[in-house]
Amino acid sequence: MSFPVAAAIAASALSFGALASGASVAAAGARPVGDAPSLRPAVNARAAAVDRCSYQVVRSDDSRYVYSVSRVGAGGTRELKIQAEDYVRVSGDWRKATQVDVCGGGQEQAPTVLRVTGKLQNPEGYDPSIPRTIQSDTLKPAAASVIPKAPPMTSVDRLDAATIRVTWKSAADNLDQVSLMERKPLYSSEVGVWVPYTYQWDVQAGVTSMNRKLERDADIPPSVRTHAYWIRVIKDGFVSDLRADKPLTIEP
């Protein structure tokens, strides 16, 4: 499962609007940020180019904050438009992978330095000792060659009324992790509705198929009934191009 169910339900109650749009849910269990000084930045992040105009930033997450990515230069800082983002489990820890557009606003030169900034949501609800703003170190993006390539999906086949088999092409041998991503309905008892939920199923090297169960409850509304599957890969802390995710779907 991609995120603990309890955290998903809590997030559903707090932000059902995001869930209804099909967004993945994050586990809220990030480390608190206190007022004690630290030699480490409050946001642990790394960056790399995906292509000339798209850069990926993979960062830690504290759900109390709203994050942005900016390019830093002699002319000051400029917040970058988000192209795609999702949560991903990297080496057992949850991270947020965000891809940003560095060419918007007439920029032609590739950025040499990026920075992640988090601003505290609802600051009036927190003790004054909680930082209102947190940041990463300045990030020098790695080359595009570090972004791994995900193998394409080939089929989603029905085995019986409640079971399907998802198949994909072989992945490269040097990857740290290959994962089958699955989006399907999850029932939230907190708000009493079915919501879209994304799971990350890690697979062993060489595996190219997996059987999955369909959610077929009669109370699932048509807007969230569709199941979707795609492959995501991880290498050296970076994730395959999120814009290239092309889910195969099936109706239960």
Image (cartoon, rainbow, N blue to C red):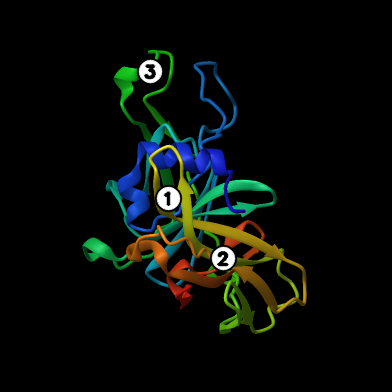
| Residue position for label 1 | 114
Disc 2 from disc 1: Cα separation: 29 Å
Task: Tell which of 165 and 219 is nearer to you.
Answer: 219
Q: Position of residue 171 (x, y in %)?
A: 68, 78
Q: Nearer the viewer, mark 2 or mark 1?
A: 2
**First-in-chain label (3 vs 2):** 3
Please report the residue visible at 65 percent of the width from the left and 62 percent of the height from the top. 201
Residue 250 image point, x, y percent: 47, 77
Q: Residue at the spot x=30%, y=47% of the render?
A: 17
How many other residues sit within 10 Å of disc 2, few (<14), some (14-19) or many (≥20)? many
- Residue 181 shows which numbered tag? 2
Assign a secondary structure to mark 3: loop
Quick one: 247 or 130, which is closer to the camera?
247
80 relative to 6 in the view: left or right: left
- Who comes first in sequence, dot 1 or dot 3? 1
Residue that numbered label 3 is attached to: 126
Question: Can see residue 102?
Answer: no
CA distance for labels 3 and 2: 35 Å
Q: Is residue 243 above or below residue 40?
A: below
Where residue 87 appears, as percent x and y from the top left, is 51, 53
Residue at the extreme front of the image, as rendered = 218
Is residue 7 something one can see in this rendering?
Answer: yes
Rounded to the nearest whole Å, what is the CA distance between mark 1 and mark 3?
Answer: 28 Å
Considering every residue shown, the one lying at the far left of the view is 105
